[in-house]
């Protein structure tokens, strides 16, 4: 029948089926909304913070299996060639194979904080970084990653420091900091608790700290321990208010397998960023140690600071991170 | 087997042929092969041009690589190429500055092509035009079919004149000293909208998805999300999601003008585009054009169904050469061989000059010319200049800057620190979408000169690292930092800090510290009821040396006083201005003139 021929019975009641369907739909929608509301109900009371994750630290030091007369602290200063200095210092410690096992994933953390060139001595020297990469690969590492959370724009820092090219040419993966690489972690610190941490640094098998020795206007000296500022994201500029305590906390959080301080060319003034080549001076020295406090104690004298005037060193020693008296370690100077 | 293969291949060949070159309705006469092929070449050129444009836009940034030169960093590609080939930009800046800046001479090539082939730039090359063409094809209106579509593609003189009036107004405004017409230039709009709105929104969404993925604690999901973010970061050359001041407005305008294709196909190109109007003015010289054999026309209107420019291709009326995008769809569609494109056509059925009323034209030019003085007496440019309008390094003095800046946003896209932003009303209505530096979002990297590197008009000069850093000369300053001593930790709260001093990039540092012994009150009440104890401690209080400060804003960016920084930059002391100065020294008004 044509549509206009259809007659609607306007007084007919809905069928039972129709009635049940409509009642059911209404009840279902209302029930669903009620369930959702009740299940997500915020009663407005400030709940006590629930159980939080563990506060953690990462200790990358290796148990020593080498001879009892092993050297734990080495200084090389016998040549202006940066690569040779690194080789000599590591050799004096017994070679890289003492620290690196076959198929290790090794992360190398230089200081790539600033948009500066090598001559300005604000970042670790690229040749030093590349040499450490080579030694680690030679020792049988599966992957070597070079990374840092820069202060200036990371692309510029990694490029102009020369580290991107040098590390890549030496066979490392260069990882620039990006938001997804940071993860909130609870640090086992006296001052520092929850901070975004550069994941790459805590997801390694071995971690090698390769800082540069520099003047720092607030902490007087920056080298190994202070280099861990570059493990954090977020607004880390707040840390300056208690710089010594935060450095000690970070050095407790990350204890590296090995520390190699680049003092081939150091920044004597206007640190940590420098800018003027006259503020830097050649020292032709590489310090390598399993003790980050001792390495810092030695290197800070190279920039004309006394370890006793760098409070975080004493803090580190009192926490058992190492010793300020590097001579007490079995040491070797070449 | 071979029989089957040959059958399949025959079938495929047939399918491709009828799809690429469909038979025409009506008489069934095949269109000329040359036209069928040209239409496909046009589509490929359009796609290629749009891809090239997007690729240039993506490459507009600092791609640090291990192969990059460590001393000098440049973009290395002519990423501003489409702007340099834009004759409307060249004409505006020619009128405002009486010069044609560097690569803008390439716009002569576009003009030359127009004077031979007509507005092929609009139909074949313009990436914004292609975007409209594509949008109108992808999202056609449900209602815009059949007769309605035919009607919508007929010439509507009243609305299609608007673009000419805008052109006259903007050119007159240029003559009055402002390249404000860049707000309406299609290439500028494309760079600005996609670069500052579409791409950052995509980046933001990827980041948000990554955050959501992190909650799953699933390694595979996380790795996928990380890879997606890394891909976006390397595609955009931005290592974190970028933010752009008030860019929601730019985004909404972009969506709105694309949406208009549903109401009037290629609304932008037909009604508003001043570049299209500029090329339309010159298309009268074109040697290539349409001839019509009206007698053959059966009024089937198939030409109008496919017309892009609304330029009256149908029989019985005159073809509007200045409106035609030379897409060649009409000839391809015409089943009766009415329409023929050829060199040196007879012009019996063509109108070659724009149809604009002289009075309205004069009135719109006058309005454009009057807009600029009106904007300037509104007390924002010369007097009562906003202290936070910090211009990029190498920017020329404000008056000249407004003559040159076309608001194309190349500088904002290229800035690796996300420091440059489109102004809203900070620089007055005339300065809308011109670049300003917002140090709290990003500071100016001292060794970076990329904004000037990509500026197509010289509003930001192509400075060298030596000029910017001041190697053997005075560095380029974009402002000066000042302390809010009531908020500064060592100044007001007896707390060590000086992150500002650490980040100050000049050498010697423009921020210097003074060691002072200050009192600090214990936060605990003394149990005896005596006032809380006080201790003495030494803090370093920062100071700015205005003679060294370059206004880069690194101090402001890193100040830990999160909400309202205790050190902030204003544009006082900017190198480009002889009047916006603090210091008496070093201001030699006779500099550069022989005495």
Image (tube, coloured by chain):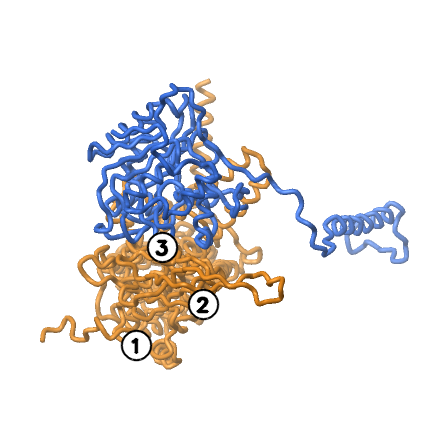
Query: What is the CA distance from the residue labelled 1 to the residue labelled 3?
Result: 46 Å
Q: Which callout, 1 or 3, points at the residue further toward the start of the chain? A: 1
Where is residue B276, by image quadrant? Answer: bottom left
Residue B92 seen in the figure: no
| Chain A pictured colour | blue
Residue nearest the viewer, comparing A223 with B563: A223
| Residue drawn at point x = 33 percent, y = 24 percent | A95
**What colour do you see for chain B?**
orange
- Marks 1 and 2 sit apart, C-alpha to C-alpha, by 31 Å
Q: Residue furthest front?
A: B528
Q: Residue B543: horizontal and vertical position, in percent?
A: 35, 65
Residue B6 location (% of width, % of height): 43, 24
The residue lying at 45 percent from left, 31 percent from top is A60
Picture coordinates of residue A131, whole percent (x, y) = 29, 31
In the image, residue B322 sits, relative to residue B31, either above or below, namely below
| SS for callout 3 | helix
Residue at 31% in and 51% down: A271
Q: Chain of mark 3?
A: B
Sort mark 3 into few (<14), some (14-19) or many (20+) by Cα contacts within 10 Å. many
Front-most of B225 and A161?
A161
What crowding class fits label 2: few (fewer than 14 Cα within 10 Å), some (14-19), or many (20 or more)?
some
Q: Nearer the viewer, mark 1 or mark 2?
A: 1
Choose mark 1 or mark 3, whichever is in front.
Answer: 3
Label 1's element?
loop
Q: Which residue is mark 1?
A: B176
Q: In what element is the residue under mark 2? A: loop
Residue found at the very far left of the displayed protein: B595
Task: Please give left or right for residue B466 compared with residue B236 in the image.
Answer: left
């Amino acid at each position: 029948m044509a549509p206009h021929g259809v007659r609607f019975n306007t007084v007919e009641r809905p069928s039972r089926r129709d009635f049940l369907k409509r009642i059911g739909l209404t009840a279902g929608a209302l029930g669903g909304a009620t369930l959702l509301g009740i299940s997500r109900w915020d009663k407005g009371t400030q709940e006590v913070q629930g159980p939080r994750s563990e506060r953690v630290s990462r200790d990358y030091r290796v148990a020593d299996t080498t001879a009892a007369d092993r050297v734990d602290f080495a200084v090389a200063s016998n040549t202006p060639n940066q690569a040779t200095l690194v080789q000599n210092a590591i050799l004096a410690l017994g070679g890289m194979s003492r620290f690196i096992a076959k198929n290790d994933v090794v992360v190398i953390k230089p200081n790539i904080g600033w948009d500066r060139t090598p001559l300005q001595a604000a970042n670790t020297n690229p040749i030093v970084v590349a040499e450490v990469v080579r030694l680690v690969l030679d020792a049988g590492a599966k992957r070597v990653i070079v990374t840092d959370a820069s202060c200036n724009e990371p692309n510029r820092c990694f490029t102009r420091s020369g580290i991107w090219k040098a590390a890549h040419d030496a066979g490392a993966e260069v990882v620039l900091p990006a938001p997804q690489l940071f993860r909130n972690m609870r640090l086992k610190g006296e001052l520092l608790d929850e901070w975004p941490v550069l994941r790459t640094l805590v997801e390694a098998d071995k971690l090698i700290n390769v800082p540069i020795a520099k003047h720092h206007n607030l902490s007087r000296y920056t080298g190994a321990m202070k280099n861990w500022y570059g493990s954090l994201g977020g607004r880390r500029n707040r840390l300056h208010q208690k710089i010594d305590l935060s450095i000690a906390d970070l050095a407790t959080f990350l204890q590296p397998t090995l520390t190699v301080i680049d003092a081939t060319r150091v920044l004597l003034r206007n640190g940590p960023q420098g800018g003027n080549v006259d503020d830097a001076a050649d020292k032709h020295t590489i310090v390598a140690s399993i003790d980050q406090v001792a390495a810092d104690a030695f290197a800070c004298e190279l920039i004309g600071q006394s370890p006793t005037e760098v409070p975080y060193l004493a803090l580190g020693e009192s926490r058992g991170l190492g010793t300020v008296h590097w001579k007490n370690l079995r040491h070797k100077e070449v | 087997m071979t029989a089957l293969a040959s059958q399949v291949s025959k079938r495929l060949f047939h399918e491709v042929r009828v799809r690429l070159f469909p038979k025409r309705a009506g008489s069934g006469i095949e269109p000329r092969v040359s036209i069928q092929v040209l239409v496909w070449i046009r589509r490929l050129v359009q796609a290629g041009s749009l891809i090239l444009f997007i690729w240039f836009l993506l490459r507009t940034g600092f791609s640090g690589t291990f192969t990059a030169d460590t001393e000098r960093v440049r973009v290395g590609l002519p990423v501003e190429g489409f702007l340099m080939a834009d004759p409307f930009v060249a004409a505006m800046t020619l009128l405002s500055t009486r010069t044609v800046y560097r690569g803008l001479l390439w716009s002569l090539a576009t003009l030359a092509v127009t004077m031979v082939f007509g507005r092929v730039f609009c139909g074949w090359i313009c990436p914004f035009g292609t975007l409209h063409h594509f949008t109108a094809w992808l999202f056609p209106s449900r209602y815009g079919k059949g007769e309605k579509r035919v009607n919508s593609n007929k010439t509507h003189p009243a609305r299609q004149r608007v673009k000419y009036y805008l052109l006259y107004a903007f050119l007159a405004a240029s003559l009055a000293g402002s390249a404000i017409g860049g707000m309406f230039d299609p290439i500028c709009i494309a760079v600005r909208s996609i670069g500052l709105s579409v791409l950052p929104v995509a980046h933001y969404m990827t980041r948000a998805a990554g955050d959501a993925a992190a909650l799953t604690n699933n390694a595979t999901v996380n790795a996928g999300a990380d890879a997606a973010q890394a891909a976006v970061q390397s595609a955009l050359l931005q290592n974190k999601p970028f933010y752009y001041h008030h860019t929601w407005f730019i985004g909404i305008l972009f969506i709105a003008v694309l949406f208009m294709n549903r109401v009037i196909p290629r609304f932008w190109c037909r009604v508003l585009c001043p570049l299209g109007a500029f090329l339309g003015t010159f298309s009268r010289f074109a040697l290539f054009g349409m001839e019509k054999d009206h007698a053959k026309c059966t009024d089937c209107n198939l030409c109008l169904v496919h017309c892009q420019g609304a330029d009256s291709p149908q029989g019985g009326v005159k073809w509007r050469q200045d409106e035609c995008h030379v897409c060649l769809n009409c000839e391809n569609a015409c089943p009766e061989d009415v329409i023929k494109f050829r060199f040196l056509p007879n012009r019996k059925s063509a109108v070659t000059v724009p149809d604009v009323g002289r009075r309205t034209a004069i009135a719109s030019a006058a309005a454009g010319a009057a807009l600029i003085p009106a904007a300037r007496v509104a007390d924002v440019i010369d007097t009562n200049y906003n202290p936070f309008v910090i211009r990029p390094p190498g920017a020329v003095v404000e008056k000249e800057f407004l003559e040159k800046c076309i608001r194309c946003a190349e500088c904002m896209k290229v800035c690796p620190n996300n420091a440059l932003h489109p102004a809203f009303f900070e620089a007055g209505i005339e300065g809308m979408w011109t670049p300003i530096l917002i140090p709290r979002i990003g500071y100016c990297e001292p060794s970076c000169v990329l904004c000037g590197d990509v500026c197509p008009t010289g509003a930001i000069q192509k400075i060298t690292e030596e000029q910017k850093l001041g190697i053997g000369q005075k560095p380029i300053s974009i402002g000066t930092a000042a302390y809010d001593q009531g908020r500064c930790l060592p100044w007001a709260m007896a707390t060590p800090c000086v992150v500002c001093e650490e980040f100050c990039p000049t050498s010697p540092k423009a921020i210097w510290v003074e060691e002072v012994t200050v009192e600090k009150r214990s936060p605990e009440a003394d149990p005896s009821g005596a006032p809380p104890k006080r201790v003495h401690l030494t803090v370093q209080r920062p100071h700015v040396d205005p003679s060294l400060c370059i206004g880069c804003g690194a101090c402001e960016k890193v100040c830990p006083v999160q909400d309202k920084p205790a050190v902030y930059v204003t544009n006082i002391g900017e190198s480009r201005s002889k009047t916006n100065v603090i210091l008496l020294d070093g201001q030699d008004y006779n500099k550069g003139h022989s005495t």
